[in-house]
Image (tube, helix red, strand yellow):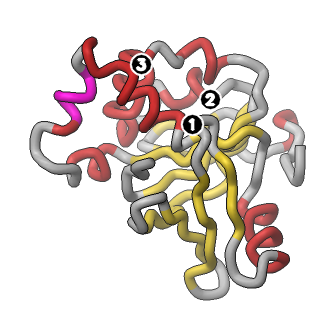
């Protein structure tokens, strides 16, 4: 694990009106965020709860509800249908990177990469991390759409979550 603070020493961060305890795993924390109810429903529908509750470590770029709401009308309900489980799984695993990368780790990789860092997702394709100003990071998907990290370094017992404002698409 790169710069991941040991969970016992990490700060508790508030996300979606709920404390995200570093001693809990990604799933145990995410279910409490009122800003991530759509993401949690999608993770359950895709059958990814056990994976994201496993030891990992994982870095999760977690879109908030309004990011899902910004998708074309009917997209989320279509993805949540059982017959679209494979597509839903592909979209969700595109938000997950093996390993634990804090914002500091990501920024260092961007600097070392001459302005961008490529991260291979669990889905298999890459995400591009870039700087937006001096202190903000952005994540660009395969289609060229850009998500901004709005809350960084939500340390979990099995990785780290970065809250983003857009759904990434492979």
Q: Which residue is mark 3?
A: 46
Kindly report the distance in space between the C-alpha atoms of the residues bearing marks 2 and 3: 16 Å
Mark with earlier residue (2, 3): 2
Taking the spot 63% from the left edge, 18% from the top edge, the residue there is 51
Residue 26 bears which disc, if any?
Answer: 2
Instruction: Name the residue at 44% across, 27% down.
Output: 89
Please count the marks in the image. Answer: 3
Res. 24 visible in picture:
yes
Q: Residues within 10 Å of mark 1 (few under 14, many from 20)?
A: some
- Residue at 38% across, 50% down: 167
Query: Which numbered marker is on residue 123?
Result: 1
Image: 9 above or below 131? above
Which element carries disc 1, helix, strand or loop?
loop
Asked if disc 2 and disc 3 are in contact, CB closer than 8 Å, the reply is: no
Q: Bounds of the magenta span?
A: 76-80
Horizontal relation, residue 82 to residue 111: left or right: left
For label 2, the SS is helix
Residue 47: x percent and y percent? Answer: 47, 13
Give residue 6's position: percent from left, percent from top: 88, 39
Does 23 sit left or right of 20 as displayed?
A: right
**Vertical comparison of 139 with 119: above or below:** below
Quadrant placement of the N terminus: top right
Task: Decide which of tag 3 and tag 1 comes sooner along the chain.
Answer: 3
Mark 1 or mark 2: name the one nearer the start of the chain. 2
At 39% from the left and 33% from the top, the residue drawn is: 39
Instruction: Tell me if residue 92 comes above or below residue 89 in the rendering.
Output: below
Nearest the viewer among 146 and 90 is 90
Residue neighbourhood size for the residue with mark 2, other residues' Cα within 10 Å, grouped as few (<14), some (14–19), many (≥20): many
């Amino acid at each position: 694990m790169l710069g991941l603070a040991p969970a016992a020493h990490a700060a508790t961060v508030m996300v979606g009106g709920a404390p995200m305890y570093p001693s809990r795993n990604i799933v145990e924390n995410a279910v409490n965020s009122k800003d991530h109810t759509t993401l949690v429903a999608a993770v359950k529908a895709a059958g990814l709860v056990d994976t994201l509750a496993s030891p990992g470590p994982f870095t999760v770029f977690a879109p908030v509800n309004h990011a899902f709401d910004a998708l074309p009308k009917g997209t989320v309900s279509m993805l949540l249908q059982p017959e679209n489980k494979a597509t839903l799984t592909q979209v969700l695993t595109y938000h997950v990177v093996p390993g634990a990368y804090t914002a500091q780790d990501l920024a260092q990789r961007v600097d070392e990469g001459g302005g961008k860092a490529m991260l291979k997702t669990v889905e298999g394709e890459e995400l591009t991390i870039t700087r937006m100003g001096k202190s903000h990071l952005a994540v660009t998907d395969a289609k060229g759409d850009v998500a901004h990290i709005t809350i960084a370094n939500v340390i979990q017992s099995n990785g780290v979550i970065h809250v983003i404002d857009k759904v990434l698409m492979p």
